[in-house]
Image (cartoon, rainbow, N blue to C red):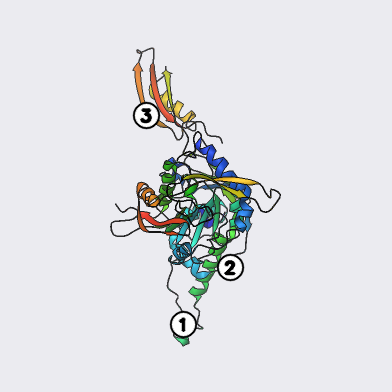
Amino acid sequence: MKILTVNFLTCAVKACKTSSLSFPLHFKDAELEQSDIEYNASFLRNILPRIDWEAFKITANELGFTTVPSEKPTISAPTTDLSTPDIVNTTSHTEVSHDKVMRDLHTLLLETEVREGKMVCGNCGHEYRIKEGIANFLLPSHLGELSPFILVIFTLHLRLDLQESASCLLSSQANLWKGSWLIGCSLTEHGPSEGYSVKVHVWRRPQMEH
Amino acid sequence: MTSNVPKGNIGQYEEIHVHQVYEEIASHFSSTRYKPWPIVERFLKDLAPGSVGLDIGCGNGKYLAVNPNVFIVASDRSVNLVKIASKHQPHSYLLADNLTLPHPLGFFDFAISIAVVHHLSTPQRRIQAVAAVLESLRRSTGAEIGGRALIYVWALEQRHSRRGWDEGDDQDVLVPWVMKQGPEEGKTFNRYYHLYRQGELEHDIVEAGGVVLEYGYEKDNWWAIAAPKPP
């Protein structure tokens, strides 16, 4: 799994794709390997406009590479005009440093591979395994396109202050209800000392494995 | 006429009659697939340098080496085929299902899905597979067509081929693959195919929210170049 590739990936769960949290995916327990790929300046220059730089910086940072330029290098047309013989051999300082930046990017984007580890969706928390350099994006059947949603109806009896108990409940079970849709709820007040009950209707996927 | 249309658990049917078969025959299959088909080659060579695209159902990755100026994220459902494809640099490789692709929507400059969609066993799933290809592409605007996809499927009309199917024959077939190498030499594996009638691929593309830019027939296959439909 090349670092460049991460820029072109999201979670495979359809509902996650519209969430900005699913991009980029986040690495966990990544083991890196350096491979050797021929440096191709024009390939890299051409591919640069298609890279989401902010996402790339997040990925690089997670893998411990903290020296990525904060701005995407600007792609200028080749500065050496080969048809003008007197400037062929003059290479300015900026060109040398630009070449260094591009070679470093080549190393990071194309030659640095995650051999083993996991990629995690920031929206649903699903983890994708990387084994021998190949990421496995096959979803367990309950998360795939055939996955049935189930309707869950339950009643909560809230005896304390309504707002306090509701937020307490939500925060303690936030993970459990991720990826679910609340489709309705009705509140019944049982009287000042009796508290409330809330009937909740939720569409949800069966429990995800973590 | 529709006797071979799979019934029951579709996912399990394709698991047995497509995914497991490719997993088993990967190495032998790959050794028979090395020459790029001319229309696919032309499509890839015509891409602008720096284009980023997908090869959905890449098999052994025989199209990855065609154009060294583009970047391809290739995926397949068979890990053994992905391992074979991963020899082609500087591209990238994933294990993924074409109905649940792990890619951003509306992003890619191009996609190819060659001899893949015909392995899905219901009309809805075939249209979904085409929709998944189209959704990954840069969207078309009123003024400009977005990303382009080349899709290839096996044709029903191939009376001069070794198989000899033609108009009026059953479109859902199990095609035997006889192993000619390795420890399982002589063993037969049956792969499921849906054979496309003339016009069916274009119909599915329109159903999936696309426009057909070009289409044709080449060596027992129907092909089409499609793009997301402009608003």
On the picture, is A13 further left or further right than B199?
right
Name which quarter of the figure residue B122 lies in.
top left
In 3D space, how far apart are the residues under numbered discs 1 and 3 (Cα atoms)? 67 Å
* Disc on the earlier residue, 1 or 2: 2
Tag 1: amino acid: Leu
> Which residue is labeled 3 in the image?
A183
> Which residue is labeled 1 in the image?
A82
Relative height, residue A75 to residue A145 (above, below): below
- Horizontal and vertical percent for residue A52? 44, 56
Task: Say which chain tag 1 marks.
Answer: A
- Horizontal and vertical percent for residue B26? 61, 51
Tag 3: amino acid: Ile
Q: Nearer the viewer, residue A145 or B21?
A: B21
Q: Report whether mark 1 lies on the same chain as mark 2.
A: yes
Q: Nearer the viewer, residue A58 or B110?
A: B110
Q: State the mark number for residue A29.
A: none
In 3D space, how far apart are the residues under numbered discs 1 and 2 (Cα atoms)? 24 Å
Mark 3 and mark 2 residues within 8 Å of each other at the beta carbon: no
> Which residue is labeled 2 in the image?
A38
